[in-house]
């Protein structure tokens, strides 16, 4: 077998394309593969698909292919422009790359696999390309996948918001609860993002009126957006969002108390983590603080009690919630009282999430994915890139990878 035959097989080329020549430069560490077609070959028109068009002229192009062991591999070919009787002169498609990409499909598939596993910056370093070129590949496939989504069977949704950069602007995520995947990402966190999602849903086979459940946080914006757009949707406030709100209230109490108590300063996380996840040193610090009967430890107990709610059946939970609220209201902790008031005003939605078990664990998992995505998108340059990474890690938009 000649080396050109071997490469021919490895590249999966079919007629009329053949590998005609290969050169290997050991000093440069690069392999060059030359692909060509015989004189008189005919190609389909890329516009109308009409077969058997004659070649009008050609232009030389180069693509980066998967490395050959540790060596950079480049594919060279003269790409024909065909003369179509209906469309005129058009550049033919080549089977190993998409138009306009300087990479073969296999190389692009490799980049996408890397992008799922590591920050783009690291992937760029690994393959020795500038990160903007990798972003371009990721963007192409992700946005194509986003547009190709079929959302016709979406009936139960969830929404969540997350900050795009530290403390700065927000993105809102919309989740198909059945598939446990992010299906839409909007910029901002107002009611308008829900309308944007509803329009997107309908443009992709879904319908506003078939959405029966929406699991959201307690922000007025999402609730208003859901009521405006999904009139048949029952709203639930899931555990993830309830506990998130409770954590914020605990943090309020702590911040206030830390102004007058140096022992709490720099100890933020021991009040936010679950006790079983603390180190020995942290546990000891926590029990020392507990002995002082601090506001923060009291707030934390209130939060932990609230967590018990999600282990009960719906009927017990309703009674428990009323007692919990009564207990919180006699405390001296304004942020906790406000929390309890908010939860009581949304009690039906909170208890519904217990009754249906709708979002158990889903939003936690999505959130963990999105936090990972944000870390991976570090240096993402544009918000569109951040959105692409969220789709890539928490969505299901790459059903058909290039091969
Ligand atoms: Zn044509």
Image (cartoon, grey):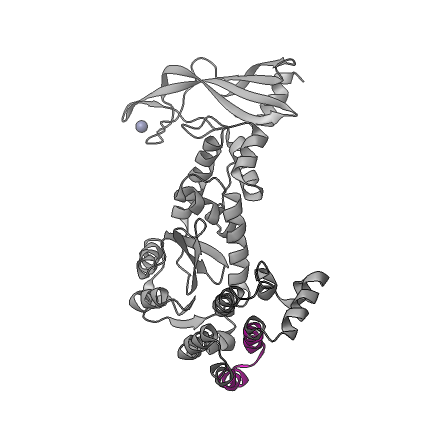
Q: In which quadrant of the rendered view does residue 281 lie?
A: bottom right
**What is the x, y in percent for residue 43?**
40, 23
Residue 110 in view here: no
Q: Nearer the viewer, residue 20 or 327?
A: 327
Residue under the image location 65 percent in, 67 percent down:
286
Q: Quadrant of the N terminus?
A: top right
Rendered view: 9 above or below 202:
above
Q: How many marks?
A: 0
**Horizontal relation, residue 361 to residue 209: left or right:** right
On whether residue 238 falls in the magenta region, the answer is no
Magenta-tinted stretch:
299-324
Image x and y of residue 134, in percent: 48, 33
Q: Quadrant of ligand 1?
A: top left
Would residue 51 be visible to someone looking at this image?
A: yes
User: In the rendered image of this protein, does residue 238 appear above or below residue 268?
Assistant: below
Quarter of the image where one finds residue 132: top left
Instruction: Name the residue located 53 percent from the left edge and 66 percent from the top edge.
Output: 260
What is the x, y in percent for residue 57? 36, 14
Which residue is more in the foreground, 307 or 141? Answer: 307
Q: Between residues 287 and 8, which one lies in front from this camera angle?
A: 287
Which sits in the foreground, 190 or 201? 190
Main secondary structure along the magenta-highlighted residues: helix
């Amino acid at each position: 077998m000649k080396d050109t035959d071997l490469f021919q097989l490895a590249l999966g080329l079919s007629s009329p394309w053949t590998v005609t020549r290969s050169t290997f430069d050991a000093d440069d560490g690069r392999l060059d593969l030359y692909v060509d077609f015989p004189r008189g070959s005919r190609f389909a028109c890329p516009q109308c698909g009409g077969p058997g068009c004659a070649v009008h002229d050609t232009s030389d192009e180069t693509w980066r292919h998967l490395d050959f062991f540790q060596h950079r591999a480049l594919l060279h070919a003269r790409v024909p422009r065909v003369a179509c009787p209906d469309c005129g002169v058009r550049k033919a498609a080549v089977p190993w790359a998409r138009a306009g990409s300087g990479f073969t499909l296999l190389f692009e598939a490799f980049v996408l696999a890397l992008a799922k596993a590591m920050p783009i910056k690291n992937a760029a370093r690994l393959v020795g390309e500038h990160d903007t070129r990798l972003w371009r590949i990721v963007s192409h496939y992700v946005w194509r996948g986003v547009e190709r989504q079929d959302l016709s069977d979406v009936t139960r949704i969830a929404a969540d918001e997350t900050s795009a950069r530290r403390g700065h602007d927000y993105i809102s995520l919309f989740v198909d609860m059945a598939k446990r995947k992010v299906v839409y990402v909007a910029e901002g966190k107002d009611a308008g993002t829900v309308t944007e999602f509803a329009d997107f849903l309908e443009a992709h086979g879904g319908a506003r009126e078939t959405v029966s459940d929406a699991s959201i946080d307690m922000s007025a914006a999402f609730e208003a957006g859901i009521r405006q757009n999904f009139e048949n949707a029952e709203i639930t406030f899931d555990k993830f969002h309830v506990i998130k709100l409770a954590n914020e209230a605990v943090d309020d109490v702590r911040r206030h108390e830390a102004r007058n108590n140096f022992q709490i300063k720099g100890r933020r996380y021991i009040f936010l983590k679950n006790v079983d996840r603390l180190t020995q040193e942290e546990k000891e610090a926590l029990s020392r603080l507990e002995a002082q009967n601090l506001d923060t430890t009291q707030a934390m107990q209130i939060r932990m009690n609230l967590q018990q709610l999600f282990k009960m059946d719906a009927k017990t939970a309703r009674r428990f919630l009323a007692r919990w609220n009564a207990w919180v209201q006699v405390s001296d902790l304004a942020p906790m009282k406000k929390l309890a008031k908010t939860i009581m005003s949304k009690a039906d939605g909170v208890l519904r999430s217990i009754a249906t078990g709708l979002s158990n664990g889903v939003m936690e998992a999505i959130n963990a994915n999105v936090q990972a995505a944000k870390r991976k998108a570090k240096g993402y340059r544009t918000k569109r890139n951040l959105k692409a990474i969220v789709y890539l890690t928490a969505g299901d938009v790459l059903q058909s990878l290039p091969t």
